[in-house]
Image (spheres, rainbow, N blue to C red):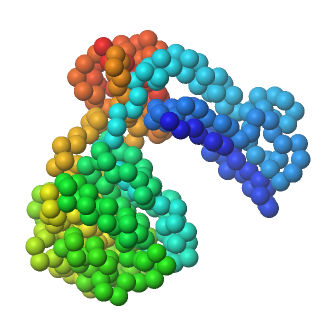
Amino acid sequence: MHWLFETAPNNSGGGAKGNTWFLHQPDGSMHTALWMNYALGGQGAIFWLWRQHRAGQEMPHGSILNAWGKPVANYDDLKQLGADLQKSSDFLLHAPVTPAKIGIFYDHEADMGLRIEQYANDIRYYTDWTYRFYLALQDQHLHRDVLMPGADLKGYKLLYLPLLPMISDDHRAHLKTWVENGGTLILGPMTGYRTEYWTSFTDHAMVDIAEWSGIAVDSRIPVGTKLRPAEIPLKMTYNGPLDLPEGQAGLWSEALSSKDGRVIAAYINGMHAEKAAIMENTVGKGKVVLLGTDPGRGHLGPLLRHYAKEQSIEPLVEGDAGPLVVHRKGIKQEGFILDNITAEPKTIELPKGKYTDILTGKPYSAEQELAPYEVRVLQRK
């Protein structure tokens, strides 16, 4: 259970220069954005603010009512959201979100550390974590939880740790045991290379991870978030189980080695030509996969899907990337919430069955054609 706090109903604004940022400009986008919260189990949303300030540095900030008491943009969308929740409240209360078997880690300390030392030029933790790594899972419609370091790992079969420079001693120990008991651990890029004091390790690039994973980092060179004019793109080729076209390395390039591990991708050119870029190795009953670079969202998605399938985790649906899809199931009710958070029509293929949209009463089959910013709360019959 969670609440969404202090979200803007239209635009944010204020600060030393009185800047404004129009967050929900397209018609219907605010309604769709708020439905993400409720679809994923949220119990409420609180807006900043109800009535616009009459004085102070945040006078330009958006609100539900303006300073002179009249409704502001998206007021009707808020009324529609309230009506939707009335119609769907029984389903939302009695058909909870199904538990995820995939976890992806997010760390506020990583954010702070990468503000001090970027290593990959122009990296912004939240933005790059979201658009490079988190959305690669959503593109494949793989249901996942966002976890913080120290989270209980019970129930998860696949864990992904991108952009996590510091991994504490306790966390590494828990991950080792979890892998040995059958989990698949995907590390990187830019993970496990700093101590808890933000210093370098001197025995291995990733301290004891190199020992128990059986995969070592031999060399590392920076790439950054975008190439500078004098730099050449570092190309990659894929081997083994992943039938993917040539890709391009991003953020940084690590050359990997392993006595027993398997090379999944290798560099084609540059200082690490013919060196391993991505490797996997069996550890106990489980597996460790080390990403020595960012392979790009288009390649990362199929890679994550491959390792999820090895753990018998299937996508919730098939179809276009973009919409949020949430499976909910209770004792007597089951269904899906489809939330097209994009400005484009999308097609989604649900598991076979008959569905009714609780919001409109319309019947649907498995194939769904979603309009831009459309939400459907589909109860399975």
Query: Would you say residue 335 is visible in this rendering?
Result: no
Give coordinates of residue 308: x percent, y percent: 23, 49
Give coordinates of residue 39: x percent, y percent: 46, 32
Q: Residue at x 33, y 57 (%)?
A: 160
- State the quadrant of the C terminus: top left
Q: Residue at x 48, y 78 (%)?
A: 198
Total marks drawn?
A: 0
Q: Is residue 269 above or below residue 54?
A: below
Residue 156 in the figure: left or right of residue 10: left
Q: Residue at x 55, y 72 (%)?
A: 115
Determine the image quadrant of residue 289: bottom left
Residue 306 in the figure: left or right of residue 119: left
Q: Is residue 297 above or below residue 290?
A: above
Query: Would you say residue 43 is visible in this rendering?
Result: yes
Q: Is residue 129 above or below residue 358?
A: below
The foreground one among 1 and 50 is: 1
Q: Is residue 8 above or below residue 291?
A: above
Q: Residue at x 59, y 40 (%)?
A: 4
Give coordinates of residue 155: x percent, y percent: 29, 45
Determine the image quadrant of residue 63: top right
Give coordinates of residue 112: x percent, y percent: 55, 69
The foreground one among 235 and 332 is: 332
